[in-house]
Every structure is written in C-alpha cells, then in structure tokens.
Amino acid sequence: CLQNVDKLLLRGIGTNVVSAQAEATRKEETDEKVGHRSFYAVQVERQEQAERSVLISCPFRVNEKRFHKYLLNHGDINKFFFYESHSVYAVVEFASRESVTSLLEAVAIPIVSDESVVPFKSRLLSLRNLGAVESPNQPVKQCQPQTTIPINELIQRLSKEESIDQQINSLTEAYQLTEENSRLRFLVCSLLKDIAAAYFPECTIKPFGSSVNGFGKLGCDLDMFLDLGGISGYSPKSGLSLEYGMKRANSERAVTQSILSVIGECVEQFGAGCVGVQKILNARCPLVRFAHQPSGFQCDLTSNNRVAMKSTELLYLYGELDPRVRYLVFTVRCWARTHGITSSIPGAWITNFSLTLMVLFFLQRRSPPIIPTLDYLRDLAGPADKNVIEGNDCTFVSDFSKIQVESNKETLEQLLFEFFEFYATFPFSRMSINIRKGKEQNKPERTPLHIQNPFETSLNVSKNVNSTQLERFVALCQESSWLFQQSETNTRRCNGTPIPWGLATLLLPSQVAGIKSRRKRKREPATERIKSLLESLKNKKLSRAETSSAG
Ligand code: CTP
Ligand code: MG
C-alpha cells in the first residue's frame, strides 16, 4: 500500500491538468496580445511549477553552495529560495518532475529515539548534515519575507512619500503577495493533493480566494478547493458496458462531508507539519481548517465549492481591468483592518470579501464607470464561457480583449476620498449593493447590510454583519472623508523626521472607535492624533533601545 502511495506521489500530473494546459495555452495567446494573462493560465502554470517543487527544512546555518550543488545532482533547478517560519525552509523548483523522483529516491526515513513515525512519504523534507560540521561562520541565508511590515512601520514609510497616489502605491507594494509567497501557496496545495491523491489519484487541490484573486495580503489565509471534477470514466456509445460500483449518499452535501471528513482525518494523522485540524462539516460550506506549520499558513480546505472558484476568477478579472482596482482594494482593506472593521476572527464584522465587493460597486458607480457590471461581462461571454453551477449562472467573458473600458481619469487620491464620501452617505437601510447590475437595488431582506452574492443571487454575502458594525464602518468613512478635507492632513510636512500625512493620517487610531462615545465627545483635531502617534513611536524606539542595551 505504501508503495502505491509512493507511485501516486511520483506520478505525472493528471490528464485533466494536461488537457487544461492545452486549453490554457490557447487562452493565454489571446490574453497576452492585450497584456493580460487569464486566471486559468496563471493557475495551471503555478500548479505545474508546484508539482516540480519540494519543501526542505534546513539547519539555520547551512552552506548554501554545497546544498545547491547537492540538489543539482538530481537535475536543473528553476527556482530556489529560503524563507523563515519557526525554522529556515528552502523551496526548490526543479526543471522537471524526474528530478523530484530522483531526489526522493535518495531520501532517508527519519530515525527517532523515543518516538515512532508514520511512514507516509511526502515532498516535505529535512536537510541533515552527517559527518562534516558546518563552519559557524556560514553567512545567515537571505530569507524572503512572508509577512507584512507592522502598521507603525507602514505609517512611517507612507509619511516619506511625495503624494497620496504614491502612498497608495507604496502600501500595495508592501502588502501584496510576493512571487515567492504565491509559489509557496501553490506548493502547500500540491503537498496536500498528495495526501488526497492516496484516495483520489485524479484530484487536484487549487487555491482560491485572496491567495489568487490579486487582492491577497502577505499572511492571509490559504483557501483550498479539493477538486474531484477531473475524475472521469469511459463514455459508452452502445452495447454492453461496465460501471464502477460506487457508494451512494443522499445529497452532494453528504458526499462532500464524508470526503472532507476522511481527508481531514488523513491530514491530521499523516500530514507532516499539519496541526490543529478542525473538521467544520456542518457549516454552509463544509471545511477542514488547520495550520500548516512549515509555511505558516492557516488553511481552509473545502470541496464542491465551484462557485467560490468563479467569484475568485471574477475578482481577478476586475483587478486586471484597471490597476486602480487593486490599489484601492488594498488601501481600503488595510484601512479597515487597522480600524478593526475587519478581523481575522469570524463574527459580526464586515469581511474582506464583502469589502472588496463594496469597492467594486463603488468603481462601477463612478462617472464614467471604471469597471463594467457583471451583467455586461455575462453578455460578452462566448459559448466556451458558459458555466452554470448548481442552477447558478456563473457565465462571464474570459477574453479580456472583448471588454471595453471607459476612459475615466480620476486619480487614486480622488477615488479614495470619493469612496469614503460614497459610503458615508449610502442608503444602507433601504438599498442593497449589487455588482451584477452595477446599481443599488431595493433590499430584499431586513439585514443591516445587504450585498448580493454575485453568482448565488439569493444570498447576502454580508448576512453576518450587525448594525453596530455597519454603524462603525459608516462613522469611520465619515471621519476619513472629513480628515481628507483638512489641509493639515493633505500637506506633506517634513523637516527631518517625516510627520504622518495624507493616507498615513487615515491609518492612525481613530476617534470613532466607540460610536456612542463619539456622539458625545468633540473630535480631537488631526494634529493631536499625529502628535500622540509620534509620541508613541518615540517611546517605542526608546524602549527598544533600552532593551537592546540591557541585552
Ligand atoms: N466567498 C463567497 N461567498 C462568501 C464568502 C466567500 O463566494 N460569502 C468566496 C470568495 O471567492 C472569497 C473566497 O470564498 O474570495 C474566500 O473567502 P474568504 O477567505 O472569506 O475571503 P478572501 O477573499 O480570501 O479574503 P481574506 O484575505 O480575508 O481571506
Ligand atoms: Mg481567504
């Protein structure tokens, strides 16, 4: 059985991926003519890179040259980088899958003295140095950052910029996923696929959500979709034919629950580095949640979740249509997180997904619109784009060259200000946000915030949001739009130490954290808030200096 698992691990990518690749190449040719790569093409390329990669935990001081040479014995390397998470890890992408096979043939089973190991082989490896002792003078390796900079550092960085547009650029640069982090996300999916492939050799595990929609921030969770759609059989034309004997269940949901339950158990029992496994099978969308320690990712594994894959593709498309989309989404997401409008803990908060739809809706409402409506994208779709999932029409155009965008010249600064103005006065009590129509619609239900799910149109993606959280959002939009209009906010003042200005001011602690108290209290001027932040930065520096001199 172990040998079988081994074979599965080393097998080439499934036929579904191969044919998908041909399809992707065709699509890619059209998209690249207009300077875009389709979501599909990017996914296939990254998945394929991940299949040729291994993840290796390394001693902190390792002779990089020697290690590299050792790996080259197994074949050419396309990409090789280190990162730190608990310990140092190397991601190694070989030029061919045969090199991974060759490398794995030379991997030993760990010998542990007072414990036992589950002999499940994977592409998560550990580098050991037998015999020769590494020199203690080995330089510490250059590690690729996998987390964002702290907010105070971001505020300082933004304060040095010359314009608000540059600040928005700088924030996005600091927060967006790096090339390396993106590769690591696909590699973790690929490692997980090896576990699931022990039962379903034709399966794939694909990342979705912010890992791939273009709006992911370093450190965001890794949403994964176990795709069994590639499992196919022979299609009989006539005469005698055979069918697989297959277990039946009452519903798709029951099948998904049983599959996730078993895969979740495997991840928990056999998955090296997978800890804190929780099976949340009764949720609307059943999932297995766990932490993948070597990458530091919080993972959510789902199955039968094709609609979410389509909404990921839609968000990616909107982000590619105009660069201002991504800049604005990053800025609004960062602003919301700083003020506790969004949170990593589930609750009555607005989620990043809802917030992104709010930004998209706002951009559709500009005059002229910056991005088109979803109905327009559906009308442009060709026959190959037709996609109906469980009765939900998820059709929209995938060929970027067909999409006409109107010429709107607004700057990022204008747009950010207008975003706050727009939602500071939006009629939330009566109207629903609808990116399909690009126009607010009458609210079909009495929830405080109603944002129509773009594909499952009877659902409200912000159903969880309570009135307190919505009021906080509106109050913060009012405050930020007010701050924007103060000349002290918008002028760069810098003699020596840069003073927070522009976007940096909007990220300072707010005065409207508690709405009720705000109604009674008079607003402190922005200068007071800036002074208090500088004071806190100074104190932090002092205490850091004290700690290091004590050490
Ligand atoms: N999704 C959805 N409907 C919802 C919630 C989520 O279709 N009510 C889909 C969206 O495609 C979303 C993805 O599931 O992007 C993942 O959800 P989530 O992790 O909550 O959002 P992210 O966009 O990944 O943002 P974050 O960085 O906060 O994880
Ligand atoms: Mg997510």
Image (cartoon, rainbow, N blue to C red):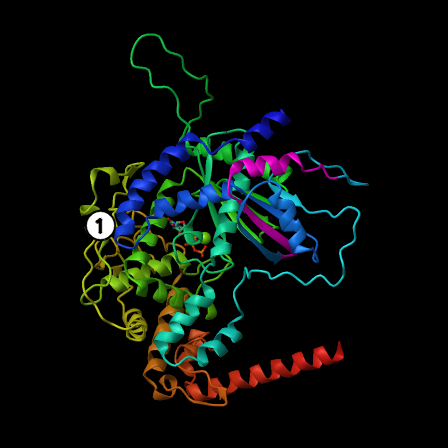
Within the image, what quadrant is residue 255 found in?
Answer: top left
Tell me the magenta residue range.
Answer: 85-110
Observer able to see residue 209: yes
As displayed, is residue 381 above or below residue 414?
above
Residue 195's x, y, as percent? 56, 35
The number of callouts visible is: 1
Observer able to see residue 511: no
Within the image, what quadrant is residue 363 found in?
Answer: bottom left
* Quarter that holds the N terminus: top right
As displayed, is residue 282 above or below residue 473?
above
Q: Is residue 363 left or right of residue 77?
A: left
Residue 468's x, y, as percent? 41, 66
Which residue lies most toward the top here? Answer: 240
Which residue lies most toward the bottom here? Answer: 495
Q: Is residue 97 magenta?
A: yes
* Quarter that holds the C terminus: bottom right
Which residue: 40% across, 86% down? 492
Q: Is residue 278 magenta?
A: no
Q: Is residue 111 left or right of residue 470?
A: right
Which residue lies most toward the right here? Answer: 113
Element type at mark 1: helix
Residue 341's x, y, as percent? 43, 66
The amino acid marked with disc number 1 is Leu
Which residue, given by chain and number where applicable, does mark 1 sit on?
377
Which residue: 58% across, 35% down? 101
- Badge 1: how crowded within 10 Å, few (<14), some, or many (20+)? many
Q: Is residue 121 left or right of residue 289?
A: right
In the image, 536 versus 284, the foreground residue is 536
Within the image, what quadrant is residue 144 found in?
Answer: bottom right
